[in-house]
Image: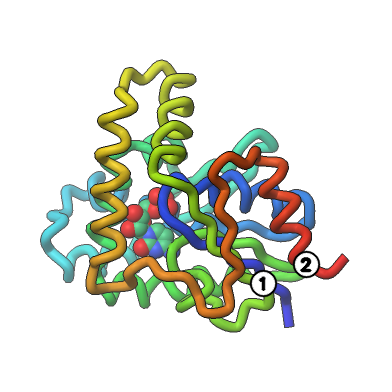
Amino acid sequence: TIPVLTIDGPSGSGKGTISRLVAQRLGWHYLDSGALYRAVGVAAGWGDIDLSDPAALVRCTFDTEIAFRDDGKELRVLVNGSDATDELRTETAGAAASAIAAIPEVRSALKARQRAFRQPPGLVTDGRDMGTVIFPDAAHKVFLTASAEERAERRYKQLNDKGVSVTLAGLLREILARDARDASRAVAPLRPADDAVHIDTTGLGIDEVVDRVLALLPA
Ligand code: C5P
């Protein structure tokens, strides 16, 4: 069977950065599952689809073509053939993603697409339910956490580097609110797989976390 390494955790835990680097080091494929939900959210926006119309969102999920292309610098995401990478990162796309991610039929429609990324020599994937629902048989599972304060600081730096003006206190409030929403939602609440290795990344640098994750795999 093709090996899978799942990296789940809350937003801002660093799972995107870590997963992509680990995949590079291993020479494995990489799937950013959140990008699929965000892509459907963006496509829904383009199609003027009401976020409170589950049937229309399910149709939109089936109709939306999503492709990834690594340009060597970063992973570009094509939605229905158009590069939507930057739009995908916006708070609007994140909010749309989290609304549509609460629809069970959307989640099951995306199941097969996610599993199709399991290709030789292996797959690293990050999200919320990779180790619990999508790849429950994965050989390697990680659950990444970090304190809310640290996650707010990371996001603050990221946005500052891009010239976006935000406050640390505002970001911390947003993160705490999103944590509460993600943990309490009825559909696919964030929880670690029973067999996941927990890594608290508070105070750790990126390389340190990458090394700890790689240490879990057989040499
Ligand atoms: O990880 P990212 O912030 O890109 O995910 C956007 C939203 O998509 C999350 O807030 C979450 O609600 C949803 N999501 C999910 N299951 C996944 C990945 C993302 O429900 N595997």
| Disc 1 target residue | 140
For ligand 1, the image quadrant comes to bottom left
Q: Is 57 on the left or on the right of 203, as rendered?
A: left
Dividing the picture into quadrants, the one containing residue 186 is bottom left
The residue most toward the right is 219
Q: Relative to the observer, which residue lies in front, 138 or 45? A: 138
Which callout, 2 or 1, points at the residue further toward the start of the chain?
A: 1
Disc 2 CB within 8 Å of nearest ligand 1 atom: no
Left or right: 86 in relation to 172: right
Asked if the residue at tag 1 contacts the one at tag 2, i.e. Cβ–Cβ closer than 8 Å, the answer is: yes
Mark 1, secondary structure of its residue: strand
Q: Which mark is residue 217?
A: 2
In front here: 68 or 187?
Answer: 187
- Which residue is at 23% across, 46% downward? 45
Residue type marked 2? Leu
Q: Residues within 10 Å of mark 2 (few under 14, many from 20)?
A: few
